[in-house]
Amino acid sequence: MRVTVYCRLTLAVAAIALAAGCSGGSALPATPAAQPYAKALSSYDPFAPAIEIAPLAEALDSAQYKAAGAFTVTALTPLNTADNEALAALELRSVGDSLEVSLTAPLPGLALYMSYDAASQHVSSMEAGSPGAIGYALEYEPGRLAAGVAGIRGAQLPTGQVLVRVTLADGALTGAIRRPSITQDKRSAVRDLEAVDNNDGSATLGWSERNTGDYDLNGEVNISDITPVGKNFNKVYGTESPDYAQLEVVDGDDNFEVNISDLTPIGLNFGSIITGYNVYRTELSSEDEEPDPADSGRWTKVENESDPGGPSAPRDFNGQDFRLRYSFVDDSGNGNFGWYVAPVGIATDDPLEGPVSNVVTLPVGGGAPPLAALTFEIMPPDGELMNVDNEFYVAVKVEGVEGLFSANVRFEYDAGLVEFLEGVAAYESNANFLTPPLFLAVDDVGPAGSPYVLLGFNATQTQGEPGKTGDGALG
């Protein structure tokens, strides 16, 4: 790849190899399907530490409350921590058997939890919302209410207006209320479970988390999930939309529009907590067999060696605003196998697991050669330093390739210092690679407007007769 220099810089910072992968073998290896969220997000740090989130019940036990009439009221953040700013701004007014909640200072959203004595009274009506905002309220346990209000498209909630109103009536609560537990909603079943043979007696599984109603992705469906709905209210999107990854999470009914109907899954799945996923494996009698997850006797849970009693793949959230992606390596040994995954709730949930995923099957093993290695070499012009307008080359070299292969490389560099000129394939000059690649491309795959360029390089060879082994430059 030819590169030119805009200013003096040392060779060490000319280009940085971010990631590389190359495989060699008699056939191109299977790869997971491309994910629509695979793009840079300015607000997300993939190296940030995992965020520990207390379950709602624990958070409420330690929260501070305000009292008014028959009610106690508190406010929590999306991470189930005390929302002191909101609590300080709450104005509570008890009018007969009713509670009215308003604000003394504007806020973008409000997540309230209220309690009353359900042994002597019951809720006769409750409402939440205001002009320019959406609201939702429910009784999720006897005597425990949740009410959320969120400004539409970033609007602030007004002061001095009633945002939440709850009215009680005499007499104990009658009828059953669904107690919070892990979701059984079929829309929360994983749909994209995939498996890749690692050619070493193991397979790598990948899938995306689904907990319908958990729109802020903190692992629990609660009243704070109204905030992303308000933020994106009435947005229509498609699979090619630049914000598809964020909007499809908030679209609880999968109709490609964020609207008032997306509040219903919050109530349906309220309190659903996902702590991770259990992975189940079964051996197949043939590659064509389609195992049924309902045939429970044939499936074995693949244990997490570091925590055998916990989920096979524990949840690891660090603030992303797109679906949490899981990756799990199963040392299955060679053979034909099938897998499915199921979300795991908390210890008190009954049942403990949510709906099962799609089933994926795969033959594992076959003696394929190990992955080939990629190396990089910067070839500067004469002299120790590179001057303005000097060109230099970044060579991508493969080592230990056998037969067919595919190489994917990413480089990141400062566009204010260097400029990419062209990518040049090196196959014709390399005796080990007698057939040109099917595809050779170099393109900027980074986010628009970034001062850095993320350069994507792909070389794939699908024909290699006569077969060759060895090393050489790709481009």
Image (cartoon, grey):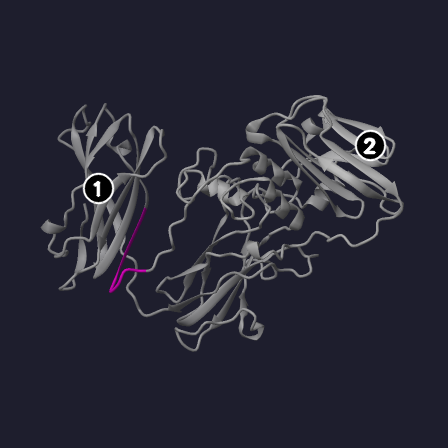
Q: Earlier in the sequence, mark 1 or mark 2?
A: 2
24 in the magenta segment? yes
Question: What residue range appears in magenta?
Answer: 20-29
Q: CA distance from mark 1 to mark 2?
A: 69 Å
Q: Amino acid at mark 1?
A: Glu
Q: Badge 1 is on which residue? A: 377
**What's the mark number on residue 252?**
none
Tell me residue 133's x, y (percent). 63, 30
Secondary structure that dominates the magenta span: strand
Say which quadrant the C terminus sits in: top left
Q: Badge 2 is on which residue? A: 67
Asked if residue 352 is positioned above or below residue 124 in the image, the reply reads below
Residue 194 placement: quadrant: bottom left
Say which quadrant the N terminus sits in: top left
Question: Could you say which is closer to the camera, residue 24 or residue 123?
Answer: 123
Q: Amino acid at mark 2?
A: Ala
Q: Sort mark 1 into few (<14), some (14-19) or many (20+) by Cα contacts within 10 Å.
A: few
* Residue 35 seen in this snapshot: yes
Residue at x 61%, y 25% (from the top left corner): 156
Tell me residue 77's x, y (percent). 65, 35
Asked if residue 406 is positioned above or below residue 258 in the image, the reply reads below
Tell me residue 344's x, y (percent). 60, 57
Left or right position of 32 against 23: right
Left or right position of 97 against 31: right
355 in the magenta segment? no
Secondary structure of the residue carrying tag 1 is strand
Asked if residue 329 is positioned above or below residue 95 in the image, the reply reads below
Residue at x 23%, y 44% (from the top left corner): 441
Residue 151 placement: quadrant: top right
Tell me residue 263's x, y (percent). 62, 43
